[in-house]
Amino acid sequence: MKSSLREYVFLDKISEESFFKDILLRCYEKKILDDYILSKIYSERMELLREKLKYYTKDDSSSVMIEIAEKILNSIDYTIGIYLKSFNDKELIIDQLKNISLSEMLQRGQDLISEKVLESRLLFDKISENKLAINNYSYNDTINDGLSLFFKEYDAFFYSHETPCSIDYQLSFDNINYVGVEYMYNYLNDLNLENEFCNKFDIAEIVELLKGYDEQSEVLLINVFELVLVNALGVLICGKDLNSLNISNLDRDYIKNNLEKLSFDRLQEELLKHMRICCESLNIKNENLIAYMETATLKITSLVNESIKINKLEKVFISFKQDIYENNFKYIDGEKMPNSKFKDLTEEIRDCSLVNDKIILIKENIKSLEDLIDMLNAECLFDDEYIKYFKSLSKFESSLLSKYVCNLNFEGEYEKEWYNKFYEYILSLSDYEKREISEIKEKIQI
């Protein structure tokens, strides 16, 4: 225990960004390294800078701006820091500083950065493949455009401490203490975990949850993972299954009655208990995801506790927008797309290799039922892509399509793949979901 305490005191308040420089400063303050070794390290550090500047200027004798030299020196320090962090042990770090040249540390740090860039690329590819089919600009723009900048522009040799990217989407936890490839890896790793969790749910449920949170949710800087996790916990507290994420007014009353008399610690235990039930219900085995959900639940506890105190549970446990289903109404179709534009769109959809990209194109461009049917007939989707698209539909959209199918003259329609896939999708739904779609369908007048 005493050794662990000494480790903590030594590494406490060491910056992730300036790890190497902070370690040297701590060694100087605690007199862990003598002046000779510190002087030797400083000389080697300046020599490494001179070598890097030669590469930067292509051995030209012309001067380099001070700002550039400072950035390159920061890059050297960051890269050596990456190597030293790999030990996470005071004695081993000190041993490296005493016995290994900075040049060798720099090379090993560069190797570690190369590995981390490769791991980050694999995570990015996985995130792109499993992206949620939702309309949130910060989420889509970050994945489609912002993150890929890093892999095009990251300079591990001269500017390893910089993070060239454009990230708007907010995770449940930020990584502001990190820079360079460490920031990118941590962000991608956490986003991948959040996507893994959200993909356990019907995407239509998540779409309805976002609409229930705010009608303009597509333009908000929100974290989808937290919204889904909170409502999932609420559903489980009410003793319901996770087929639906909707929380009704009665559900909120039940949640309040069960939680309002609990102390903060007991409330935290209760939420953690249902978090573990959530993992069991969704068959989540990934220990990293479970740990992430646990940390998020601890964060959520304060939010739930405060909302109970001020009697604002509806701001935390979200209800779907269901008023439109209460009465019969006449559906008026949107404006049909010009033939040339429709042709270009269907070709673009067919050219997409990822089904999520196809779904986004469809949702962003097709605004009428007639165009939707034409698109389905145009064979833009194939095999299980149909099922994934149908799962992205809201309850109302599924009901509208079901109403159209019921009104068809079925001669020849059974030969169309999309119809058979839609029928297969409807059969896969729970009895509750089938009943809900049937009730909505009966209220629609096309």
Image (cartoon, helix red, strand yellow):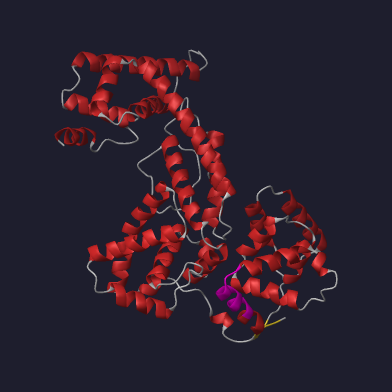
Q: Is residue 405 above or below residue 291?
A: below
Viewer-side residue, 269 vs 367? 269
- Image coords of residue 337 (percent x, y): 76, 65
Give residue 380's quadrant in the image. Answer: bottom right
Magenta segment: does it hold 217? no
Decide whether the magenta segment is chiefly helix, strand or loop: helix
Instruction: Tell me which segment is drawn in magenta.
Output: 429-438
Q: Quadrant of the C terminus?
A: bottom right
What residue sits 43% from the left and 65% below the top? Answer: 232
Residue drawn at 24 percent across, 74 percent down = 261
Residue at horizontal 65%, vertical 71%?
A: 398
Location of residue 49 in the rendering, given as x and y in whole percent from the top left corner? 39, 19
Q: Is residue 443 left or right of residue 52?
A: right
Q: Nearer the viewer, residue 63 or 76?
A: 76
Instruction: Give percent across and percent down for residue 385.
Output: 68, 56
Residue 216 visible (yes or no): no
As drawn, is 382 to the left or to the right of 322?
A: right
> Among all residues in the image, which is located at the extreme bottom?
327
What residue is drawn where x is 53% and y is 56%?
199
> Front-most of 409 and 36?
409
Picture quadrant where residue 37 is located: top left
Tell me, yes or no, if residue 172 can be seen here: yes
Furthest residue toward right? 411
Residue 228 placement (x, y as % from top left): 45, 62
- Quadrant of image for the N terminus: top left
From this view, report whether residue 71 is shown above or below residue 250. above
- Disc tally is 0
User: Would you say residue 435 sits in the magenta stretch?
Assistant: yes
